Image (cartoon, rainbow, N blue to C red):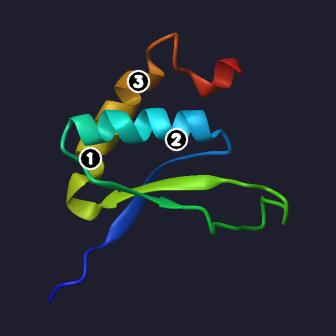
Amino acid sequence: MERETRVAVFESEKPSEIQLVKSKLEAKNITSFLNDNYMSFTTTPTANTVRLMVNLQDEQKAFEIIDGMLKQTEFNPSNN
């Protein structure tokens, strides 16, 4: 059995953003996975950053979908 390689395509501390991106990806037949155990030197122990992961072969298509979402005014995390 071959192991699938997963890559992060989106991360947020807001569950609503994660769910919106996840639903858009799944609507385009891209299976996504949540990873909420992500910690780095830029986060604090209380940070609740969630990463949305996809299989490596879906990475480019996922980024195209997310990029399209970010260009829409109603979904732009930098506006919050």
Mark 2 or mark 3: name the one nearer the start of the chain: 2
User: Is there CB contact under 8 Å for labels 3 and 1?
Assistant: no
Which residue matches tag 2? 18
Residue at 68% of width from left, 44% of height from top?
A: 13
User: In terms of image quadrants, where is residue 53?
Assistant: bottom left
Q: Secondary structure at mark 3?
A: helix
Residue 38 % position (x, y):
63, 66
Vertical position of residue 67 compared to residue 3: above or below: above
Mark 3 or mark 1: name the one nearer the start of the chain: 1
- Residue 49's disc is none
Left/right placement of residue 28 relative to residue 69 reads: left
Q: Residue furthest top?
A: 73
Which residue matches tag 1? 60
Mark 2 or mark 1: name the one nearer the start of the chain: 2
Few, some or many residues within 10 Å of mark 2 (<14, 14–19, 20+): some
For the C terminus, the image quarter is top right
- The residue mark sitting in front, 2 or 3, is 2
Which residue matches tag 3? 69
Q: Residue furthest left?
A: 1
Residue type of the residue flagged with mark 1: Gln
Vertical position of residue 32 compared to residue 5: above or below: above
Few, some or many residues within 10 Å of mark 1 (<14, 14–19, 20+): few
Left/right placement of residue 71 relative to residue 42 reads: left
Q: CA distance from mark 2 to mark 3?
A: 12 Å
For the N terminus, the image quarter is bottom left
Vertical position of residue 66 compared to residue 72: above or below: below
Q: Secondary structure at mark 2?
A: helix
